[in-house]
Amino acid sequence: MASYSFIIIGSGIAGLYTALLACEHGNVLIITKGTIDDCNTKYAQGGIAASIGSNDSADLHYKDTVKAGDGLVDTEAAHILSSEAPDRISDLVNFGVPFDTTNGAIALTMEAAHSVPRILHAGGDATGAYIEATLSSRVRERKHDIKVLEYCLVTDILVKNGNVTGVRALDLRMGSVLEFEGRFLVLATGGAGNLFKYTTNPDVATGDGVLLAYKAGAELTDMEFYQFHPTGLRIPGVAPFLISEAVRGEGGILRNVEGYAFMKDYTPDAELASRDVVARSILFEMRKTGADRVFLDVRHLSPNVVTTRFPNIYKYCYDRGLDITRGLIPVAPAAHYMIGGVKTNNWGETNIAGLFATGEVACTGVHGANRLASNSMLEVLIFSKRIIEKIFQSGPKTGSVNSPSVNTSLPDRKTAVAKLPVSLRALQDIMWNKVGIIRDREGLILATDTLSSWQACLPETTDRPTYELNNLVLTGRLVAEAALIREESRGAHFRSDFPDHSKDWEKHIIFIRR
Ligand code: SIN
């Protein structure tokens, strides 16, 4: 059996960046179910937050992060994130990421819920694509230290006496089962946007790491907090392509179908309120006007600013018959980011020795109940670096303090819900309609009962689609069960039957397999 110091599952920014740090210490295997470039990172537009501007500070970044997280941020993690950010940006620059500049200095833009412009970007609105291309070319240069296994789906984490020993995987082209031995295993599998009918994520985001970790006995937390981006493009027959938060940061205005700029009616921060508030306001406005969309208006901005700051968005819309310098952009919220995930401490460690998680699959607690825009790729850089430091440096290390929590496992639901054929489409519909932006007990009970009965009749896992469906059904069930348990509204989790915060819920929900 081939043996590696590190096995990393996933090839987005989290997998590649961790591999580049790890390969200085031992041989690395990256396993990815598609090609190295099939990942969510390359669709990230807005950028990376870091307090490198002259009017900014780590303290201000910390405060914005904690405020957006609505009472559930792990404050130690947020301190680490905001104070280590400038150094991690230097690391990316050293790897060759070409951030956009103005007069020789890195250009910074504004995004919602940030007090000052602090978002670095590359290629205008192609930040993720530039990072992915840079890091994957660095990884290819290290081919003697980093082996990349493409079209290979990890199906099991191997654990012996409480320690990770390796993984089992399915070679998707040959159909053969492979096993690899590894001392340290890093989950970098991303999120699960395909749970929902409308998502900004590509089709690789299917909750793979959540299921792997759960089966292995890892703790999962904050699953009820799924972030919906306020502005996915809403054109019939077109996937909800992301219209970056930075478009509002640069002055874009939201209008309802009657042309009215409605955001001030909902919050004094208007278009720059935090993402959960803007997404809900849009939904309420859509319901009020009976429309399935609102519009984002950038016609008042100089066409030159629009086409140079947002060349991809401009081209994507132009190719579909819409010149956004002259016409309104139809938008509606879409699932964007899994805030919860595999519980880690501030060194990326899970509760299983040798198992680490980083990026969207991990829950470091830094986002609390609602992620501040452009903190996600930063979180990867910070905590991936700390995983490698934790493994290879001596000295006193502490994890995060234990926050108050409800520890539970998935309940048995012996219900008589009709065993509908389980399909991705049916799952996405129920998740969107009952576990989406606005939730209530009745809808969540229907969703949890249905998902639980589906779990009992899932197709046998033989190939990528059947594994992905299994992964999504379990992940959806965890989101729905957590949303049912949390009887309050906080951050990205909104219950119409419990519309306020509750002091009793200043705590996390942790699932562990029985
Ligand atoms: C965006 O460009 O709006 C996405 C940024 C993010 O999700 O942090």
Image: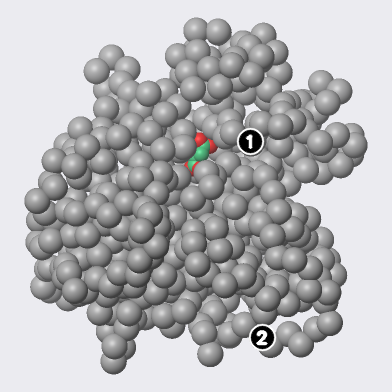
Mark 2 neighbour density, 10 Å: few (under 14) some (14–19) many (20 or more)? few
Assign a secondary structure to mark 2.
Answer: loop
Which residue is found at the position 24% from the left and 18% from the top? 104
Residue 56 percent location from the top left of the image? 37, 37
Q: Earlier in the sequence, mark 1 or mark 2?
A: 1
Which residue is found at the position 66% from the left and 57% from the top? 424
Compare residues 65 and 166 and report the one nearer the observer: 166
Residue 222's image quarter? bottom right
Q: Can you see residue 69?
A: no
From the viewer's perspective, is residue 456 above or below residue 232?
Answer: below
Which residue is found at the position 71% from the left and 32% from the top? 237
Assign a secondary structure to mark 1.
Answer: loop
Mark 1 neighbour density, 10 Å: few (under 14) some (14–19) many (20 or more)? some
Q: Name the residue under label 1.
A: 239
Q: Residue 428 carries which label?
A: none
- Image position of 40 (left or right of 269): left
Q: In which quadrant is the N terminus drawn?
A: bottom left
Compare residues 100 and 163 and report the one nearer the observer: 163
Q: Can you see residue 321?
A: yes
Which residue is found at the position 39% from the left and 62% from the top? 175
Residue 130 percent location from the top left of the image? 33, 32
Tally of marks: 2
Residue type highlighted by circle 1: Ala
- Image position of 361 (left or right of 484): left
Compare residues 41 and 390 and report the one nearer the observer: 41
Q: Which of marks 1 and 2 is in front?
A: 1
Residue type highlighted by circle 2: Pro
From the viewer's perspective, is residue 164 above or below residue 252?
Answer: below
**Separation of disc 1 and disc 2 at Cα?**
35 Å
Residue 103 percent location from the top left of the image? 28, 14
Residue 41's image quarter? top left
Q: Name the residue under label 2.
A: 411
